[in-house]
Image (cartoon, rainbow, N blue to C red):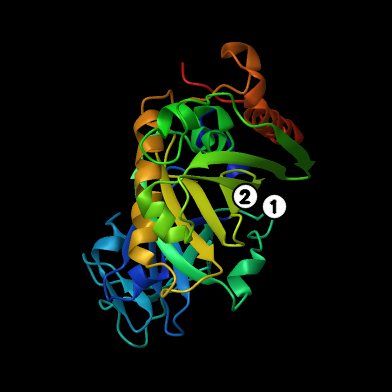
């Protein structure tokens, strides 16, 4: 499936960058589903997103400057507001109105969980609600914001795959001696999946410190939710009551690349476990996944006959069926690489 050629995928919200990245006079560029955007904060500190192309001579607005909450083109100084309208043309006199045709495409844009979210078309669904993000008992730790050269669907399938732990994660938590995947309980949601499972894992020294569990192995009780198209939460509960909830988005940059956005929520404090050490362990895990996933084909087939499967692939199979149903419901045909 080529994500940039499936119009329905433009109707979902995606986190595109940390809000803090916009706290500068330099507007920021981002590519979403092949669409080049420029983002900045308006006068009220709210994020704006428009097409990264001045309507005058096609210059990238992201190479310009933010002036009084507007983005100014570096070529001739034309300025645009968050609605995409040109609000200043230095070459016009004060009594000359700015033609209404002087405008660029604008996109829905908001801030949530410390990130800027963008939807390119009329949203089908709201941004998923994460109750723990509003719970004062939990702290939020931003972890990763980086480009991966692989499909978002591959990343989502990997997140729900219990069979790769013993092989991909041998250096972190995988038990090489026990490759048989743990059983799972899958519930189909209207716009996603929920998977529950209990997974015995190795508990290396750094993780013993992070979890305050001085045992060489431990048990993870996982409650995972996938949200169409490329978002997931993984809530891990440990025997001592610690909850480590990971939010991961694979925001589609293009057909071949995804922007991985990840933060975690934990019901402990910095005194209990240092954020930098929590990030260090999760970093080691994600790098193991990234190495494998960046070697996979980016054009993931929704037709189940094109790849082989085993029992533990059930969540991934259901995801592909959900995508196929989504395309059908919106009159689309899966677009593939020729």
Q: Residue 104 carries which label?
A: none
Q: Which residue is drawn at 73% across and 32% down?
A: 325
Name the spot of residue 244 as percent of width and height, x first.
54, 58
Quadrant position of residue 9: top right
Q: Which residue is drawn at 68% across and 27% down?
A: 314
Dot 2: what SS?
helix
Measure the alpha-carbon separation of dots 2 and 1. Answer: 6 Å
Disc 2 crowd rating (10 Å Cα; few below 14, some 14-19, many 20+) is some
Q: Do the residues labelled 2 and 1 touch (CB within 8 Å)?
A: yes
Name the spot of residue 6 as percent of width and height, x first.
58, 35
Quadrant location, the N terminus:
top right
Name the spot of residue 276 as percent of width and height, x first.
33, 63
Q: In this view, does 256 lie above or below 203?
A: above
Q: Which mark is residue 124?
A: 1
The one of 64 and 242 positioned closer to us in this rendering: 242
The one of 195 and 207 positioned closer to us in this rendering: 207
Residue 84 visible in the picture? no
Quadrant position of residue 150: top left
Q: Residue at x 44, y 34 (%)?
A: 255
Residue placed furthest toward the bottom: 94
Residue behind mark 2: 11
Name the spot of residue 14 as percent of width and height, x first.
53, 54
Residue 301 visible in the picture? yes
């Amino acid at each position: 499936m080529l994500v940039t050629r499936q119009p329905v995928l433009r109707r979902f919200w995606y986190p595109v960058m940390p809000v803090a990245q916009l706290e500068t006079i330099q507007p920021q560029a981002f590519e979403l589903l092949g669409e080049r955007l420029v983002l900045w904060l308006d006068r009220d500190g709210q994020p704006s997103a428009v097409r990264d192309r001045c309507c005058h001579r096609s210059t990238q607005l992201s190479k310009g400057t933010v002036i009084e909450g507007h983005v100014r083109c570096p070529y001739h100084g034309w300025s645009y507001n968050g609605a995409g309208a040109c609000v200043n043309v230095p070459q016009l006199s004060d009594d000359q109105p700015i033609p209404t045709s002087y405008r660029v495409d604008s996109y829905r844009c908001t801030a949530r969980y410390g990130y800027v979210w963008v939807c390119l078309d009329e949203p089908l669904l709201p941004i998923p609600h994460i109750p723990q993000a509003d719970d004062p008992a939990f702290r939020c730790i931003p972890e990763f914001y980086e480009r991966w050269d692989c499909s978002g669907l591959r990343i989502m399938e990997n997140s729900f795959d219990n069979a790769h732990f013993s092989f991909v994660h041998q250096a972190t938590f995988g038990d090489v001696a026990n490759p048989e995947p743990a059983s799972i309980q899958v519930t189909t949601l209207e716009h996603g999946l929920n998977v529950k499972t209990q997974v015995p894992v190795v508990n290396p020294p750094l993780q013993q410190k992070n979890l305050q569990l001085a045992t060489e192995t431990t048990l993870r009780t996982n409650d995972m939710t996938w949200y169409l198209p490329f978002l997931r939460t993984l809530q891990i509960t440990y025997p001592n009551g610690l909850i480590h909830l990971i939010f991961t988005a694979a925001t589609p940059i293009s057909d071949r690349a995804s922007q991985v956005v990840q933060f975690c929520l934990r019901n402990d404090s910095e005194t209990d476990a240092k954020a930098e050490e929590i990030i260090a362990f999760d970093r080691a895990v994600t790098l193991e996944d990234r190495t494998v996933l960046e070697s996979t084909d980016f054009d993931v087939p929704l037709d189940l006959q094109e790849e082989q499967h085993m029992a533990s692939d059930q969540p991934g199979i259901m995801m592909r069926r959900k995508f196929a149903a989504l395309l059908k419901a919106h009159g689309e045909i899966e677009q593939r690489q020729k």
